[in-house]
Amino acid sequence: MTLERARALLADQVAFGSGYNRNAARLILAEVEREHGQNSVDNLITELQLDTVFGLQPGMHFNR
């Protein structure tokens, strides 16, 4: 998955903003972490304010 595609998918999840969308965002971030690394995940969390919307913090790992 490209970072642009991940950004678009995460933006959709933020727009809906429910608990189910939080789980979907975690799955997207897990794929980003596998393909692009932790730094990319942290950048997306900060850029899309996923800490505020879903409580996801930079530095969290999603591949476990």
Image (cartoon, rainbow, N blue to C red):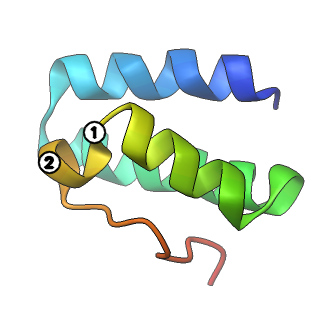
User: Residue 52 at what x, y percent from top left?
Assistant: 14, 48
> Mark 1 is on which residue type?
Gln
In the image, 3: left or right of 35?
A: left
For disc 1, the neighbor class at 10 Å (few under 14, some 14 to 19, many from 20) is some
**Which quadrant holds the N terminus?**
top right
Q: What residue is drawn where x is 49% and y is 75%?
A: 59
* Residue at 52% in and 40% down: 44
57 vs 61: above or below: above
Q: Quadrant of the C terminus?
A: bottom right
Q: CA distance from mark 1 to mark 2?
A: 5 Å
* Residue at the bottom extreme of this rendering: 64
Element on which disc 1 rests: loop
**Front-most of residues 57 and 13:** 57
The quarter holding residue 57 reads: bottom left
Find residue 30 and report its horizontal and vertical position in percent.
63, 59
Residue under numbered circle 2: 52
Q: What is the count of numbered marks?
A: 2
Query: Which quadrant of the view contains residue 7?
Result: top right
Q: Which mark is residue 49?
A: 1
| Whether residue 55 is situated above or below residue 29 in the rendered picture | below
Question: Which residue is rendered at x = 37% and y = 16% of the image?
Answer: 12
- Residue 6, percent across and down? 63, 28
**Label 2 near label 1: C-beta < 8 Å?**
yes
Type of amino acid under label 2:
Thr
